[in-house]
Image (cartoon, rainbow, N blue to C red):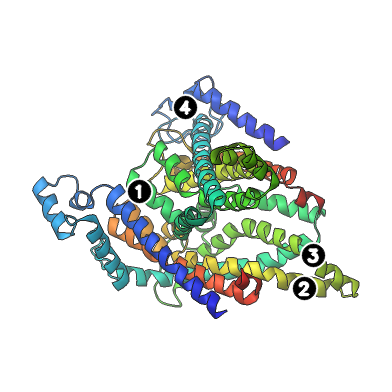
């Protein structure tokens, strides 16, 4: 296990190198001259030159990349162009609201969809299964934007059940604003989750150990919960761990629609204002987080499934 | 089978729209009746400029099919190419390609998509490019492992014995055996490209203003709903719904047909 862990940790280094390199190339080389964009449309050539010098853009590219790496390592991304706020602070402030929405949504969705998928997998090809499958397929055929629009329109605007948008940063006050976004989060993930988990369960149900368990005379309930569910949980857990970085990001769309000051909302604002440094920082921070969670998920997988270690 | 005919129907509709044979009034501005309620004359009402919503939604099919087709095609071509080379040659080439796609894969998809379209400026071409260039990793991974499986098989060795070159073995001998992967991934990519168009449109990274697109109609609905104008959203959603649903069902059918393992269970 130690050897595997070490190998897997070392493997992260080239990936982090690649990630920062891609972000750097994408924004500093392919995206045109950042200095010209920072200076705005009406800047003179002289102004642009000054800004370019201030930003260190007149240095050779490898040196610029080195500066960029220093930024990433010291978690110092400078200030936003539009709000002049410190980006690292913006990021830390945004984590809380994002998690308030996404974490409950994520947990509720899992608690709903896993039992449902197990039931559908067990009753495979029954009327209930076919009907639910169709509903799930229909649900994932609608754009996520439509759910948000419809939820906000009917539940907030028409029925006044929830506030249309806004945020209260106090711990108790925020739930009033968070409820509808959480509900939408759950609805958004149901279709895909049920379809995916059902396939996993069905795959397990045809394995030999299930036949053995049944031939020993175990009840359906024991076979389903003690045998099938436990084995299928391995892929479910690893997949779930992989989704955690996305929880930190929150849902870009939900946050921007409901005016929630989370990371998704910040990113959408930055896109609308062409706020280069913020977008750049968000991409790189979230990517690094994702890489770390990817590593954790792999290690976790190796703990539950020893076969992986030997590969 | 129904799903297949629905897709064909959309293709026909898009072709007719592109040739300006049906719904020719999609760009006719009528300032006297902005946001007209649905009527016999305008089944789905009109938009802010008095343009017929049904006609615009129908013309949106063209945009969606273009984005879906080119986005998915680009992603499949890149994915197949890199996957084939990595899986076939192995060694250093494989390491490099694996490193490259694992890196890309570690950037959250939506952010990569946004970052890419952000730096290259909005437009139809960017949409296709951004979607194609950012979504090939999953396909590449599958093609790679399929090539690893196939390269040691007797028929490849046979081809080698008969003097077939590397490229001949890759493209003439092994590639046809991965066609099922390519088909399924193309079809999956099509669906996700159509969905990505909506999100990018909302973020202001969609097609040019004035070009009819479902993404634009859905994101415009945010302001329209505040005035109780729901028909634009409903029209675009319905058009998109049946296309995406048809593709998803078609996908399942193709997968069942091509993957005998699943069929027997």
Residues under numbered marks 3 and 1 in contact, where contact means CB atoms less than 8 Å apart: no
Identify the residue under disc 4.
B26
Residue B160 image point, x, y percent = 62, 42
> Secondary structure beneath disc 3?
loop
Q: Nearer the viewer, mark 1 or mark 4?
A: 1
Q: Which of the 4 quarters of the picture holds residue A239?
A: bottom right
Q: Secondary structure at mark 1?
A: helix
Q: Residue at x 31, y 71 (%)?
A: A73
- Callout 2 touching callout 1 (CB < 8 Å): no
Label 4 Cα crowd, 10 Å radius (few <14 / some 14-19 / many 20+):
many
What's the chain of the residue with tag 2?
Answer: A
- Per the image, the residue denoted by label 2 is A227
**Residue that label 3 marks:** A207
Chain containing the residue with disc 3: A
Residue for badge 1? B118
Between residue A70 and residue B174, name the one nearer to us: B174
Residue A261 in sight: no
Q: Is residue A54 left or right of residue B126?
A: left
Q: Secondary structure at mark 2?
A: helix
């Amino acid at each position: 296990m130690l050897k595997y862990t070490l190998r897997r940790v070392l493997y992260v280094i080239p990936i982090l190198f690649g990630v920062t390199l891609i972000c750097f190339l994408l924004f500093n080389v392919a995206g045109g001259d950042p200095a010209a964009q920072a200076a705005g449309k009406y800047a003179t050539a002289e102004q642009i030159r000054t800004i370019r010098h201030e930003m260190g853009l007149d240095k050779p590219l490898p040196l610029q990349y080195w500066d960029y790496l220093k930024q990433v390592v010291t978690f110092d991304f400078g200030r936003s162009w539009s709000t002049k706020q410190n980006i690292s602070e913006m990021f830390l402030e945004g984590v809380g609201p994002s998690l308030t929405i996404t974490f409950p949504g994520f947990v509720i969705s899992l608690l709903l969809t896993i039992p449902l998928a197990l039931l559908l997998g067990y009753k495979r090809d029954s009327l209930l299964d076919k009907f639910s499958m169709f509903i799930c397929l229909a649900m994932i055929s609608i754009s996520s934007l439509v759910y948000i629009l419809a939820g906000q329109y009917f539940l907030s605007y028409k029925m006044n059940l929830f506030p249309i948008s806004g945020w209260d940063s106090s711990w108790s006050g925020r739930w009033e604003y968070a409820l509808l976004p959480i509900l939408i989060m759950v609805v958004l993930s149901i279709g895909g989750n049920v379809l995916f988990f059902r396939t996993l369960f069905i795959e397990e149900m045809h394995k030999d150990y299930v036949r053995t368990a049944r031939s020993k005379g175990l009840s359906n309930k024991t076979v389903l919960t003690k045998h099938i569910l436990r084995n299928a949980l391995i892929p479910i857990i690893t997949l779930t761990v992989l989704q955690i970085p996305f929880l930190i990001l929150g849902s870009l769309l939900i946050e921007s629609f409901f005016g929630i000051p989370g990371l998704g909302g910040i990113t959408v604002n930055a896109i609308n204002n062409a706020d280069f440094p913020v977008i750049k920082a968000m991409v790189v921070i979230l990517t690094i987080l994702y890489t770390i969670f990817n590593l954790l998920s792999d290690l976790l997988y190796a703990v539950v499934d020893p076969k992986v270690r030997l590969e | 089978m129904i799903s297949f005919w629905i897709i064909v129907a959309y293709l026909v509709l898009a072709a007719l729209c592109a040739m300006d044979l049906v719904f020719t009034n999609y760009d006719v501005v009528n300032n006297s009746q902005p946001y007209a309620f649905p009527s016999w004359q305008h089944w789905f009402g009109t938009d802010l400029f008095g343009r017929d919503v049904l006609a615009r939604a129908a013309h949106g099919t063209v945009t969606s099919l273009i984005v879906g087709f080119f986005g998915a095609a680009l992603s499949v071509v890149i994915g197949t190419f890199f996957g084939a080379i990595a899986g076939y040659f192995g060694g250093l080439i494989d390491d490099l390609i694996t490193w490259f796609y694992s890196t890309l894969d570690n950037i959250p998809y939506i952010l990569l998509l946004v970052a890419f379209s952000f730096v290259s400026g909005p437009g139809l071409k960017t949409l296709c490019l951004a979607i194609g260039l950012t979504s090939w990793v999953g396909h590449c991974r599958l093609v790679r492992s399929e090539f690893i499986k196939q390269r040691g098989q007797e028929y490849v060795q046979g081809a080698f014995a008969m003097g077939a070159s590397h490229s001949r073995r890759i493209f003439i001998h092994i590639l046809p055996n991965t066609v099922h992967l390519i088909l399924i991934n193309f079809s999956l990519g099509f669906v996700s490209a159509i969905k990505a168009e909506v999100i990018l449109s909302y973020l202001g990274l969609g097609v040019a203003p004035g070009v009819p697109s479902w993404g634009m109609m859905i994101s415009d609905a945010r302001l329209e709903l505040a005035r109780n104008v729901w028909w634009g959203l409903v029209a675009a959603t319905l058009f998109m719904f049946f296309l995406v649903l048809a593709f998803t069902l078609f996908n399942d059918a193709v997968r069942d047909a091509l993957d005998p393992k699943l069929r027997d269970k």
